[in-house]
Amino acid sequence: MQKFTTMTGLVAPLDRANVDTDQIIPKQFLKSIKRTGFGVNLFDEWRYLDEGYPGQDNSVRPLNTEFVLNQARYQGAQVLLARQNFGCGSSREHAPWALDEYGFRTVISSSFADIFFNNCFKNGLLPVVLSEAELDQLFTECEASEGYALTIDLAAQEVRTPSGAAFSFEVDAFRKHCLINGLDDIGLTLQDADAISAFEVKARAARPWVFNALAR
C-alpha cells in the first residue's frame, strides 16, 4: 500500500451530500476484484452522458461537460471535497479503489458512512473529517481560485490552505501508523514473517503427518 505522509494536491469540489457507493462506482462494474480498472468509471453516471458497462472504450464516450471532474481546471485533482455522509449505501471496496486509481489521495467531508470510512484506510486513502463551517470555507476558496491546492499533513493532522490557515482533524493512532508506513492488513501480517516461519517449522516437526497429508 502506498504511504501517506504529507501531500499538496489540487482540489476538486463535489458539492453534493449523501453521495453513495453506487454513484462512486456503479454496480455493473463490480465483477472484478483486481483492485484496478475502476478509475475510468469513477462517478460514471455523472461523468458520461451514455450508459456505462464493463469493457467500454471510455475515450469515445460523450462527456457531461457540466460535471466537475470533466472541467479542465480540475484535471489532475488529488483532493476531493465532498459534503456530509459521503460513501453511504452498500458496502463495496471498489469505491475507494476507484477513487484511488483515479488519482485521489484524500477525501474531505463533514461525515462519512462507517464502512466506506474504514475501507479507505485499508486501501491507502485518507478520509478527513472537518466541520461544516471549515468545509464551507474550503468550497468557497476552491471555487474562487483556479489551481486551488491544499496540503494534508497526516503526521501533524492538519489541512493547510494556500493562505496559511490550518484545520486540525482527528485520526485513530493505529490507522495513522498504518497509512504513514504504507501497511495494509497483509503488510501488517508480513511484519511477523520470521515468527510465522518459525512457528511453521516447529509445527512441521511436531506434526509431520499433517503436512504430509496436505502435500498429497
Image: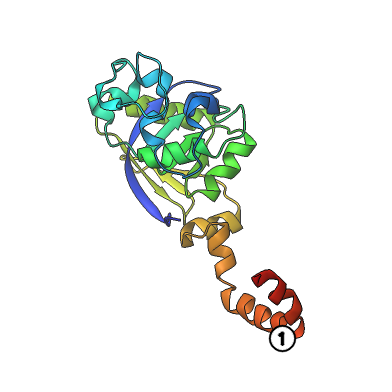
The percent position of residue 168, horizontal first and vertical second, equals 50, 45
Taking the image as shown, residue 77 lies to the left or right of residue 159, namely left
Position of 36 relative to 140 (above/below): below
Q: Quick one: quadrant of the N terminus? A: bottom left
Residue at 63% of width from left, 75% of height from top? 196
- How many other residues sit within 10 Å of disc 1, few (<14), some (14-19) or many (≥20)? few
The percent position of residue 76, horizontal first and vertical second, equals 28, 37
**Element assignment for label 1:** helix
Residue at 49% of width from left, 23% of height from top? 23
Q: Amino acid at mark 1?
A: Ala
The residue where tag 1 is placed is 205
**37 vs 3, nearest the viewer:** 37
**28 vs 179, nearest the viewer:** 28
The percent position of residue 97, horizontal first and vertical second, equals 46, 41
Position of 205 relative to 177 (above/below): below
Residue at 75% of width from left, 78% of height from top? 209
The reply to whether residue 26 is visible in this rendering is no
Specify the quadrant of the image occupied by residue 55: top left
Specify the quadrant of the image occupied by residue 147: top left
Q: Quick one: quadrant of the C terminus? A: bottom right
The percent position of residue 50, horizontal first and vertical second, equals 36, 14
Position of 152 relative to 210 (above/below): above
Specify the quadrant of the image occupied by residue 129: top right
